């Protein structure tokens, strides 16, 4: 399945149906009077966030969505049927933005639905225009128009932890080692071209991790569409920053990614961060310790040696992630009974 994380669509709710112009015609009733019914209400546009969807690819091929209009009223004071609502299914994590992308109109962080554009009300039939001075009205309402607008749909993945790093830092190898994601792995930059999600099971706990394509300098300003990739980790509770131990300058690589997180904003630079020196299996123990100490001094945080390919340090990294994502509940004192009472 192809991955698409944003799409522009046109939506329009249904127009209300016209009211009827009708007069009662029955045998032995000389002056039946008006009996035209009202028109039916137009259908609503409804967005519904559902489980099981993880892409907006369907909106690449269909961009126009129009709800059904209401039917016209009829004689005998019969109201016309309302138009059917149009339900647009989107993945959980989808945002609905205005045409200029300046305003978030809806944010679906959990399954559910929301009426977005209300259908127009039906027009009044001539029955409703009857008065003491207008006994045989022939006017009627044509029905209120529906609402219409262009909107952007933007998908932001829902994950507990997000993987960040320069291209070829070993993120795909890591996510394959700890999940069943089956991300593509290659010995060239930008092997990952779309975000990946995987579920980690570790020490009787589960959490979701997101692997985004590698970031480059200027990503926060759109270089390599990095701004779109960074949007997928806005909802993560912790970032796992992988630094290539076999790269030319691991410290510079770390600062490059940190700069992009700070420039992007949205609180990414303030999120808890776990740093791992990846591909440690390619270095000897002495050099690994030296690089770990150098990176720890530059970042001001603990650095864990790691190898996604051989499994070195995997448990330690996952343990740290769980500490941030799902810390253990505080232990109850021994002298508190089952009902929560403690002796004086």
Image: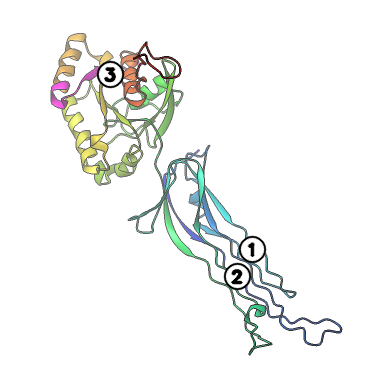
Per the model, the C-alpha gap separating discs 1 and 2 is: 8 Å
Residue carrying label 2: 122
What residue appears at the point 55 percent right and 71 percent down from the top-left corner? 144
Q: Mark 3 and mark 2 in contact? Answer it, CB < 8 Å.
A: no
Q: First in sequence: mark 1 or mark 2?
A: 1
Percent position of residue 101, x then y: 35, 55
Mark drawn on residue 238: none
Q: Magenta residues?
A: 296-310
Residue carrying label 1: 82
Residue 185: image quadrant is top left
What residue appears at the point 14 percent right and 20 percent down from the top-left corner? 294
Of residue 269 and residue 137, the one placed in the foreground of this image is 137
Residue carrying label 3: 279
Q: First in sequence: mark 3 or mark 2?
A: 2
Of residue 157 and residue 143, the one placed in the foreground of this image is 143
Q: First in sequence: mark 1 or mark 3?
A: 1
Query: How crowded is the residue under tag 1: few (<14 C-alpha within 10 Å), some, or many (20+)?
Result: many
* Callout 2 secondary element: loop
Residue mark closest to the camera, 3 vs 2? 2
* Callout 1 secondary element: loop
> In this picture, is 89 found above or below 144?
above
Left/right placement of residue 133 relative to residue 317 reads right
Per the model, the C-alpha gap separating discs 3 and 2 is: 67 Å
> In this picture, is 133 found above or below 205?
below
Q: Residue farthest to the front?
A: 344
Q: Would you say residue 128 sits in the magenta stretch? A: no
What residue appears at the point 56 percent right and 52 percent down from the top-left corner? 87
Percent position of residue 282, x then y: 26, 15
């Amino acid at each position: 399945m192809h991955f698409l994380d944003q799409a522009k669509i046109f939506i329009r709710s249904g127009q209300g149906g016209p009211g009827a112009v009708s007069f009662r015609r029955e045998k032995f009733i000389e002056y039946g009077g008006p009996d035209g019914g009202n028109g039916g209400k137009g259908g609503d546009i409804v967005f519904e966030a559902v489980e099981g969807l993880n892409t907006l690819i369907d909106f690449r091929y269909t961009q126009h969505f129009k709800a059904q209009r209401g039917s016209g009223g009829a004689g005998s004071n019969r109201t016309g049927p309302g138009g059917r609502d149009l339900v647009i299914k989107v993945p959980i994590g989808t945002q609905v933005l205005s045409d200029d992308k300046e305003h978030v109109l809806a944010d679906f962080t959990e399954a559910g639905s929301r009426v977005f554009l209300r259908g127009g009300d039906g027009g009044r039939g001539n029955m409703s225009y009857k008065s003491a001075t207008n006994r045989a009205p022939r006017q009627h309402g044509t029905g209120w128009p529906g609402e219409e607008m262009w909107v952007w749909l933007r998908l932001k993945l829902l994950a507990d932890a997000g993987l960040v790093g320069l291209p070829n830092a070993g993120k795909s190898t890591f996510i394959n080692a700890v999940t069943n994601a089956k991300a593509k792995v290659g010995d060239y930059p930008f092997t990952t071209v779309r975000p990946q999600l995987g579920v980690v099971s570790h020490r009787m706990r589960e959490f979701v991790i997101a692997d985004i394509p590698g970031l480059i300098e200027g990503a926060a300003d759109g270089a390599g569409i990095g701004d779109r990739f960074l949007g997928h980790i806005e909802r993560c509770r912790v970032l796992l920053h992988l630094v290539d131990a076999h790269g030319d300058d691991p410290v510079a690589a770390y600062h490059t990614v940190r700069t992009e997180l700070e420039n992007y904003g949205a609180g990414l630079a303030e999120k808890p961060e776990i740093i791992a020196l990846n591909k440690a299996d390619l270095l000897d123990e002495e050099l690994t310790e030296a690089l770990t100490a150098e990176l720890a001094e530059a970042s001001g945080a603990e650095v864990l040696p790691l190898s996604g390919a051989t499994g070195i340090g995997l448990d330690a990294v996952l343990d740290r992630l769980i500490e941030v994502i799902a810390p253990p509940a505080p232990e109850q004192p021994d002298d508190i009974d089952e009902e929560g009472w403690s002796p004086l």
